[in-house]
Amino acid sequence: MSVGATIAVNDRHRWSRWHAVPLAAWLADRLAHSSLRPWQVTCAGLVCTLAAAAMLCVAPTWHLAAAALVWAAWLCDRLDGALARRQSTATAWGGWLDANVDELGDVAIHAGIAAAFATEISSAVWALFAAFVVGKYLLVAGLRFEEQVVAASTAPLGARAAPGAASRARRLYHELGDADLRLHLLLAALVCRAWLPELIFVASYYNLRWMVRYVLVARRLCGGAP
């Protein structure tokens, strides 16, 4: 697959398609016949994220280096899937590892941001980090249950089109669910040392999102319209 075709496939990565996606495609083409395997790339991404988190904990002034490491981790996240497709080595285990590494990395880097803010300003920021973790857990748990409901139901929990403000709110809801968008907001926060806005954003995002999903699922299970 050419770089151009890969960019088209990954068009939903509206920002990464200008840097990480084409670079990952280029690297995958050249590493396809090497001994490097996708799971090793996945683990390398985790190492980059953990290193960035540790850097923020120990030396918040190294925030630009931490941002570079987070970007490198994102590149690895784009590369492992592209490499698996080139090598025809995609497996269920690899997908499971990638998903879990993504979640662990997300928690780790925000723990680093909380530590950086606590070191420089106030330890009260840990309350925001706790809210982020709780919201993330409830969203993931809720989505897992929702998948079970969909599998057992003849009426999927898909969203219906809605006019006016409801439709715009739904588009915003799904826009904020874009990992590519959140990654670039995270990079901007690291570059600008915007510790507090980043934690407020992710804590609000995950808690509002699980609340919305719970309401939608409850309405469908109770016989109401989604």
Image: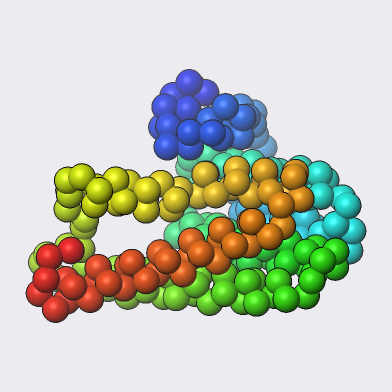
Between 226 and 35, which is closer to the camera in this rendering?
226
User: Is residue 66 shown to the viewer in this render?
Assistant: yes
Total labels: the figure holds 0
Between 80 and 192, which is closer to the camera in this rendering?
192
In which quadrant of the rendered view does residue 79 lie? top right
Residue 50 left/right relative to 146: right
127 in relation to 2, above or below? below
Residue 83 left/right relative to 64: left
Instruction: Name the image colouring.
Output: rainbow
Q: Residue at x 31, y 73 (%)?
A: 214
User: Is residue 140 shown to the viewer in this render?
Assistant: no
Q: Horizontal and vertical percent for residue 186? A: 64, 50
Q: Horizontal and vertical percent for residue 187? A: 67, 45
Residue 218 left/right relative to 143: left
Q: Horizontal and vertical percent for residue 207? A: 46, 69
Q: Horizontal and vertical percent for residue 185? A: 60, 46
Q: Residue at x 40, y 69 (%)?
A: 210
Q: In the rendered view of the protein, which quadrant contains the C terminus? A: bottom left
81 in relation to 212, above or below? above
Q: Residue at x 71, y 52 (%)?
A: 194
In which quadrant of the rendered view does residue 5 lie? top left
Q: Residue at x 64, y 56 (%)?
A: 197
